[in-house]
């Protein structure tokens, strides 16, 4: 069996890995992940031309640390709570109407990006800075690949392609790059501290 296909993700290193204790740990991780996503969505870092939240940092880090299955479950729980009306997203409101707005595509992209990050982490991409950077670039690309078409569907006819690109991606690229560097350092550092970096 290819060992690159069976590497543990970070969440599997801590605590029980079987039976009821495993289920309890997984539920606790989902709750912790939803709380982290909510907190990250509310953090606003002053930047030009728009403030940046830490939401995508949390999404991609959770995906890599939790693995595909648990990462996607966590993101789906987060989206479900937001769809139910709890203000867990970047804005002050939530619910299905909010999710059908400009950020809707990006929210769906979060789950897809978490799945990809978990898949790559299972193959060891979270163990060193270079591969983690590549994984995060791909994860960000997935978010934009889902979010930008939704923005275009909503606004292309009235605002034009340049506006869609600027407000759907361009304004956020600098912040994304800084978050990418931070996330790319985080998980490999934890793995190195655990003595499991390679």
Image (tube, rainbow, N blue to C red):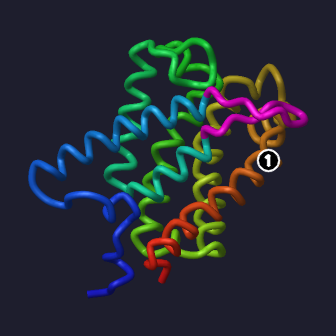
Seen in the picture, residue 120 relative to 62 is either above or below; the reply is: below
Give the percent coordinates (x, y) of residue 188.
56, 70
The residue positioned farthest toward the right in the image shown:
48
Percent coordinates x, y for residue 181 in the rendering: 71, 60
Classify residue 198 as left or right of residue 70: right
Q: Quadrant of residue 161?
A: top right
Horizontal and vertical percent position of residue 173: 79, 47
Left or right of residue 144, residue 176 in this image: right
The residue sitting at 64% across, 63% down in the picture is 184
Position of 72 relative to 154 (above/below)? below
- The front one of 96 and 33 is 33
Residue 7, image quadrant: bottom left
Residue 20 to residue 1: above or below: above
Q: Magenta stretch: residue 183 in it?
A: no
Query: Measuring 26% from the left and 40% from the top, which residue is drawn there?
Result: 27
- Of residue 194 and residue 197, the one placed in the foreground of this image is 194
Q: Residue at x 61, y 60 (%)?
A: 136
- State whether residue 116 is above or below residue 126: above
Question: Which residue is situated farthest in the left direction here?
Answer: 19
Name the residue rendered at 9%, 54% in the picture: 19
How many C-alpha atoms fall within 10 Å of the one at disc 1: few (<14), some, or many (≥20)?
some
Indicate whether residue 48 is drawn in magenta. Answer: yes
Task: Return the residue at label 1.
Answer: 173
Tally of numbered tags: 1
Quadrant of the image for the N terminus?
bottom left
User: Residue 154 occupies which quadrant of the picture?
Assistant: top right
Q: What stretch of residues is rendered in magenta?
A: 42-55
Residue 160 vs residue 144: left or right? right
Q: Residue furthest bottom?
A: 1
Q: Secondary structure beneath disc 1?
A: helix
- Residue with the most extreme front position: 193
């Amino acid at each position: 069996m290819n060992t690159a296909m069976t590497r543990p993700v970070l969440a599997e290193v801590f605590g029980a890995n079987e039976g009821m204790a495993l289920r309890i740990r997984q539920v606790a991780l989902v709750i912790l992940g939803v709380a982290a996503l909510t907190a990250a969505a509310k953090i606003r870092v002053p930047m030009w031309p728009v403030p940046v939240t830490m939401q995508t940092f949390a999404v991609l880090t959770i995906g890599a640390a939790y693995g595909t299955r648990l990462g996607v479950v966590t993101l789906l729980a987060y989206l479900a709570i937001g769809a139910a009306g709890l203000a867990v997203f970047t804005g002050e409101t939530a619910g299905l109407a909010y999710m059908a707005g400009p950020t809707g595509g990006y929210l769906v992209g979060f789950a897809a990006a978490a799945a990809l990050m978990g898949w790559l982490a299972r193959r060891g991409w979270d163990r060193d800075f270079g591969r983690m950077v590549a994984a995060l670039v791909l994860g960000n690309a997935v978010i934009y690949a889902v979010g930008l078409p939704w923005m275009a569907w909503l606004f292309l006819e009235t605002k034009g392609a340049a506006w869609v690109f600027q407000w759907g991606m361009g304004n956020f690229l600098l912040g994304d790059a800084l978050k990418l560097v931070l996330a790319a350092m985080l998980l490999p550092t934890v793995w190195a501290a655990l003595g499991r970096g390679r």
